[in-house]
Image: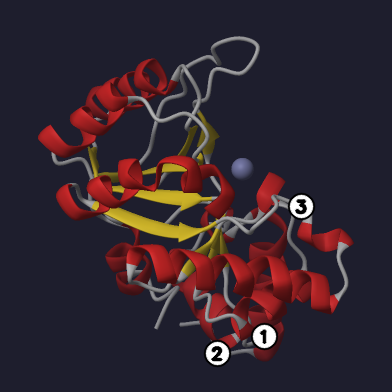
Amino acid sequence: MWRSRAVLAAFASLSLTFGAAQVADAAGAAAAASRGVGLPPVVSHVPTEENVVFITVDDGWVHDPAVARTLVERRIPVSLFLLPGATSYDTRYFTDLAAQGRVSVENHTVNHPDLTTLDAAGKDAEVCGAGEQLAATFGREPKLLRPPYGAVNDEVRLAAKACGVKALITWTYDFTTWSETPATPRLRAGDIVLLHFTPTLGADLQRALDAAKAAGLRPAALMPHLKSAGLVP
Ligand SMILES: [Zn+2]
């Protein structure tokens, strides 16, 4: 086991820079994340022995009924990092999903800023503010934060912690079709897939599910695996 302070500090800084997952030793990374600096970890991949991937969908602007049907009927576990403003014109789309599907609603700030550019009060307003709005709508306080653009530093982690965030979740691969459809990567156990509520979500989700199947992986809920990896208490 990693006992030396120096080694722990090295892992903490590695996990800060690259995400805990890219650190070779999973146990060391988990230990560093939980004991290193007392801040919630930044996670781009979850160390796991299980054949699982994690599907995450961001923002919430486009509400395709076919996507909701797929998620509900196929019982696909997903984490939704929602902007309160993107859900508010059709809140029912998401409250139905949360009620009927295997969906966890998580924090993505109020206005989607680069949190590293804001002062402490600004970070607090964005993260705590979104958490409060989502809790009021969905009846559960988000425990995970996806920092917009994946932009994080220690001050962002500190602000997130003060708002009750247990982990900051970035991603391993973005499957979103932006100007073009990205090449499909070979997924590995513990990878975090990023999707967005865009007009192509149905197709992007299907590519992600096909890639998972091709790699012998199944979608799983994020929080239980963060806990079993020791990343979240
Ligand atoms: Zn976003």
Between the residue at mark 2 and the residue at mark 3, the CA separation in whole angstroms equals: 38 Å
Residue drawn 24% across the image and 47% down it: 96
Judge the density around disc 2: few (<14), some (14-19), many (≥20) Cα neighbours within 10 Å. few
Which residue in the structure is indicated by mark 3? 113
Residue drawn 50% across the image and 80% down it: 31
> Circle 3 sits in a helix, a strand or a loop, which is it?
loop
Tag in front: 2 or 3? 3
Judge the density around disc 3: few (<14), some (14-19), many (≥20) Cα neighbours within 10 Å. some
Q: Considering only vertical position in the picture, is 226 above or below 45?
A: below
Judge the density around disc 1: few (<14), some (14-19), many (≥20) Cα neighbours within 10 Å. some
Q: Earlier in the sequence, mark 3 or mark 1?
A: 1
Between residues 48 and 128, which one lies in front from this camera angle? 128
Between the residue at mark 2 and the residue at mark 1, the CA separation in whole angstroms equals: 15 Å
Between the residue at mark 3 and the residue at mark 1, the CA separation in whole angstroms equals: 25 Å
Residue 74 visible in the shown view: no
> Circle 2 sits in a helix, a strand or a loop, which is it?
loop
The colour scheme used to paint the residues is secondary structure
Would residue 94 appear left or right of 114 to someone viewing this image?
A: left
Between residues 99 and 161, which one lies in front from this camera angle? 99
Tag in front: 3 or 1? 3
In percent of width and height, residue 133 lies at 51, 67
Tag in front: 2 or 1? 1
Which residue in the structure is indicated by mark 2? 3
Q: Earlier in the sequence, mark 2 or mark 3?
A: 2
Which residue in the structure is indicated by mark 1? 37
